Image: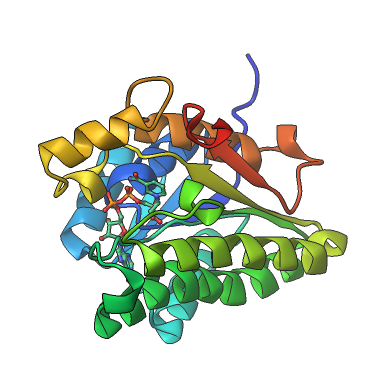
Amino acid sequence: MTTPAFEGRTALVTGAASGIGLAVARRLAEDGAAVVVADYDEDGAQLAAGELETAGARAEPVTVDVTDPSSVAEAVRFTVDTYGSLDLAVNNAGISGPSLPTGEYDIAAWNRVIDTDLTGVFHGLRYELPVMAEGGGGAIVNMSSILGTHGFSGQAAYCAAKHGVIGLTKTAALEYAPRGIRVNAVGPGFIDTPLLRETDNPMRERLIALHPQGRLGTAEEVAELTAFLLSDAASFVQGSYHLVDGAYSAQ
Ligand SMILES: NC(=O)c1ccc[n+]([C@@H]2O[C@H](COP(=O)([O-])OP(=O)(O)OC[C@H]3O[C@@H](n4cnc5c(N)ncnc54)[C@H](O)[C@@H]3O)[C@@H](O)[C@H]2O)c1
């Protein structure tokens, strides 16, 4: 029998109460990781951690608001205090914004999306990197999007944030590669998660049609790529952006 890829390693996953983050937490736990399920949805984080524990994994919920640096610092500290190390991190928590042309974009919504989707990822890196460096290395995945390289009408804040995540990823990777930390970004196409649940049917059909595979992706498909990037099998994959998008961006 082969040893599970993440046996003996500790993972912190933000936004792990739902959608892609939950699928990533499940995937890492299945492969032996102890997982800290971090989310500002306290009940959701507890439910998710409970589910992982019932399945035989080690998991703890933690309430975090990624827009608040002290909250993220506390979640990282909690991980190390609970499991003794931080080896893997997935900066995944994110929100979408209203759909409005840039010339009419709501200022408060802009700030909310940038604070969560871009600054939230920075906060993760800011507190994860020193702990991993001190521990001798690690691997981080930042959740970007196909909108990290493509524009999308009505989504100025989300597109700006997701483009920014790729720049952050490359910079952190350059800085920390010599210290044994790999940092990569994932770019999912449109994925069938609660984030898209508010989308009305005609819009959903339009989104499906943008993917040559003729469907939305699943959270599990994103989790699979994320797990690969975090694993030792990806030991020379560093500072890059990886698509899981049904050929959306091949067009
Ligand atoms: N669903 C898609 O089509 C899609 C496509 C590309 C990228 N993404 C990205 O994937 C990530 C996960 O999205 P999802 O589709 O799973 O969404 P989701 O809404 O199902 O899950 C997001 C989770 O993040 C949590 N969260 C939101 N703001 C937070 C905050 N400030 N602090 C802590 N937790 C917070 C939510 O409570 C929720 O549990 C996001 O970064 C999103 O931008 C999603």
Q: Is residue 237 left or right of residue 147?
A: right
Colour pattern of the rendering: rainbow
- Compared with 206, 72 (above or below) is below
Query: Can you see residue 244?
Result: yes
Image quadrant in which you'd find residue 205: top left
Tell me which image quadrant ligand 1 sits in. bottom left
What is the quadrant of the N terminus in the image? top right
Q: Is residue 97 left or right of residue 227?
A: left
Looking at this view, name the residue that lies furthest to the front.
Answer: 103
Q: Is residue 2 left or right of residue 244?
A: right
Image quadrant in which you'd find residue 192: top left
Looking at this view, name the residue that lies furthest to the right.
Answer: 178
* Residue lying at 73% horizontally and 68% vertically, measured from the top left: 171
What is the quadrant of the C terminus in the image? top right
Where is residue 102 shown, x and y percent of the image?
35, 72
Residues 42 and 185: in front is: 185
* Residue lying at 47% horizontally and 55% vertically, measured from the top left: 151
Where is residue 227 shown, x and y percent of the image?
56, 37
Residues 38 and 85: in front is: 38
- Compared with 145, 27 (above or below) is above
Residues 93 and 113: in front is: 113
Q: Is residue 186 left or right of residue 98?
A: right
Where is residue 108 shown, x and y percent of the image?
26, 84
